[in-house]
Amino acid sequence: MPTIDSLELSENTKTAYSLNLPAKKACPEKTAACEEVCYADKGRMRMNGALVTGRNWDRLQNDVTSVERIKLPKSNELAIRLLGAGDIYSLGFGRSMFRLCDKYPEKKFWAYTRSFSILRQLLREREIPANLSLFVSADNDNIEDANYMAEKYGLPIAYMGDTAPEVESFVCPAISNPEKLPLTKKKSMAPCQICKYCFNPKMKQRRMEK
């Protein structure tokens, strides 16, 4: 059997495709709030995703550039979620993740991150790729830092909670209204691929609740 030297994408009925790393282990700036409710460390995602995230983690320890060799789906209509589980755990990984986006300018990517200190280092080196919609992920524990990142770098905020504080926000329909955007095995009909909010550049300055 040939050796796989790239990371693997995971398939699911919400996002269609996502790049997943081990929950918590690959989250250097996790907060107490997100650690308590971490969806990627519970239930079916933890059980079914452990093998892929474990393999991805092992490959990254040997070669952080393995993220740049991911085999992406052929369709340019489907956006790829980066960091469906895990986060930007190192500066080297962040650089390679950005280079993956550079490599496929015709594709759209989106991600949420709490790795603010690493992101600040990255943004001293270069701009975020034009085809990557990157949200700072916030909750009550890190909202002040998230607001600082949003204002300094012009980034949108994804707020984990029932109500985003003191701001009008877009409520994620994949979570708040599953009847409107049902889960489906057809990739093009997955809730995130229908909604397109998170990877639509025209909406980039808005905030959302998830």
Image (cartoon, rainbow, N blue to C red):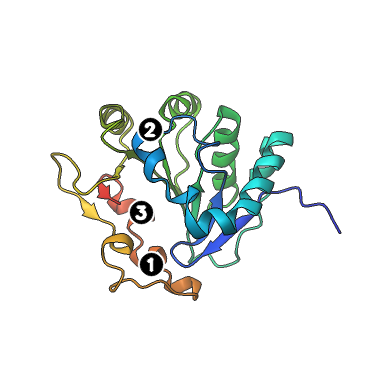
Q: Residues within 10 Å of mark 3 (few under 14, many from 20)?
A: many
Where is residue 199? Give x, y as percent: 39, 54
Q: List the residue tagged with mark 3.
A: 198
Residue that carries the numbered disc 2 in the rendered image: 31
Which residue is depicted at the point 26% across and 50% down? 209
Q: Quadrant of the N terminus?
A: bottom right
Identify the amino acid type marked 1: Pro
User: Which of label 3 and label 1 is nearer to you?
Assistant: 1
Q: Measuring from the top left, give residue 149's x and y in whole percent.
A: 32, 30
Give the quadrant of residue 2: bottom right
The answer to whether 145 is drawn above or below residue 188 in the figure is: above
Of residues 100 and 163, the one nearer the viewer is 163
Label 1, secondary structure: give it: helix
For residue 156, the mark is none
Q: Is residue 90 visible?
A: yes
Name the residue: 13% across, 39% down: 166
Q: Position of residue 88 (x, y in %)?
A: 51, 36
Inspect the image, locate mark 2, and give the three-letter code of the amino acid beneath it: Thr
